[in-house]
Amino acid sequence: MMTSLPLVFDAPRRALPPRHLADLSAGERRDAVVALGEQAFRARQLSHHYFGRLTVDPAAMTDIPVASRDRLVGELMPALFTEVRAVSCDAGTTRKSLLRAHDGTLVESVLMRYPDRTTLCVSSQAGCGMACPFCATGQGGLTRNLSTAEIVDQVRMAAAAARDGSLGGGPARLSNVVFMGMGEPLANYRRVLDAVRRICDPAPDGLGISQRSVTVSTVGLVPAIRRLADEGLAVTLAVSLHTPDDELRDTLVPVNTRWKVAEVLAAARHYADRTGRRVSIEYALIRDINDQPWRADLLGRLLHEHLGQLVHVNVIPLNPTPGSRWDASPKPVEHEFVRRVNAAGVPCTVRDTRGQEIAAACGQLAAEG
Ligand code: SAH
């Protein structure tokens, strides 16, 4: 992956973008508007345009006088991203967009239409510091955290694109958001949490997506999982386990050297108990690495023990990344793996792979310009 190397060496301490409406809570938005010498109710109007109508175009904000409009948009809606490129596949139902931030940082998000829902896979960081060896994002290291508004704006842009018919099959309503793009969301905790609130608050204070339709996926940062459990949210937690034994997990998910499988599962149980939500366990199935029948049995046993009925396993056939020697398991091996986990009383299904040929599938996001 030669093309991503400059990002590593070129990564001085990059600054977050200037303050944006979507960084602020409703109360903070009011205060910010008043501090600019405008009337407080303008905050609600602006929020209606941004969160409700999904627009940042001052010309469309005709309920606000022109002078105020320019000042408010100038101060509170700095442009966060330019879309460098959008590519589609799967008959137009998968669409990846490459976005350039104010400082040149590149991030990607992927919009996917299914028969019953439309999902955005969103990035929480530019790059990632978790260094999982099978994931393209992990190979380039962490460039920087994204701001709350940069996360929310990915969702706003995707919701507008779906509404305006950018996906195959015509206009669609963005219904789900998964934090499975670039980055480790729980390593950017405060900003991700604020973004979740903005994504889920009803319009005009937020984008109005149901908490239950938002998934936060983590490598297993135990203290952050416990903290998330106590936030009073109903979002789905996904844990990228990838193997039930510490020995292999220490290499597949290097943060396992800090928090072991048993601690991760105990934190997941705490999350399930506090929220009443089933935890998703992500398992990238890698040929001859983690796909053995004994690992399926051990996985089923451990999950049943720790989580009982409050768990579901998503098997993700490994998406090969450039330069990696790893591959997906053969289908019969995959079927046997799934069968054994199910036989242990743990629901287990194979996640359908989208966007492989446009490098938009799980673990393929590298954001090369
Ligand atoms: N950092 C978070 C979220 C980002 S990745 C996390 O690790 O959970 C979303 C999912 O894709 C994770 O389960 C990740 O392990 C998985 N993934 C990464 N690379 C992959 C690859 N090459 N093939 C299949 N899944 C992969």
Image (cartoon, rainbow, N blue to C red):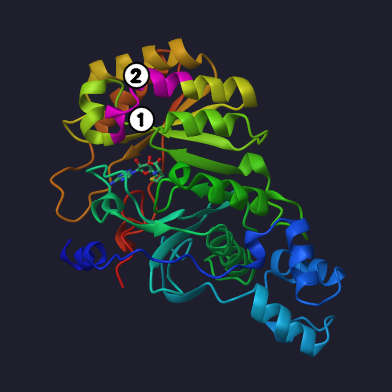
Observer able to see residue 276: no
Observer able to see residue 179: yes
According to the image, label 2 marks what residue?
Answer: 299
**Image quarter (top left, top right, bottom left or bottom right) of the N terminus:** bottom left
Identify which amino acid the numbered label 2 is placed on.
Answer: Leu
**Image quarter (top left, top right, bottom left or bottom right) of the C terminus:** bottom left
The magenta stretch spans residue 256: yes
In the rendering, at what x and y percent does residue 273 appear?
60, 19
The magenta stretch spans residue 271: no
Identify which amino acid the numbered label 1 is placed on.
Answer: Leu
**Is the C-beta separation of discs 1 and 2 under 8 Å?**
yes
Q: Residue at x 65, y 81 (%)?
A: 74
Q: Nearer the viewer, mark 1 or mark 2?
A: 1
In the rendering, at what x and y percent does residue 29 appear?
74, 63
The quadrant holding residue 246 is top left
Circle number at residue 198: none
According to the image, label 1 marks what residue?
Answer: 241
Relative height, residue 20 to residue 359 (above, below): below
In the rendering, at what x and y percent does residue 201 appear?
72, 51
Q: Mark 1 falls on what kind of element? A: loop
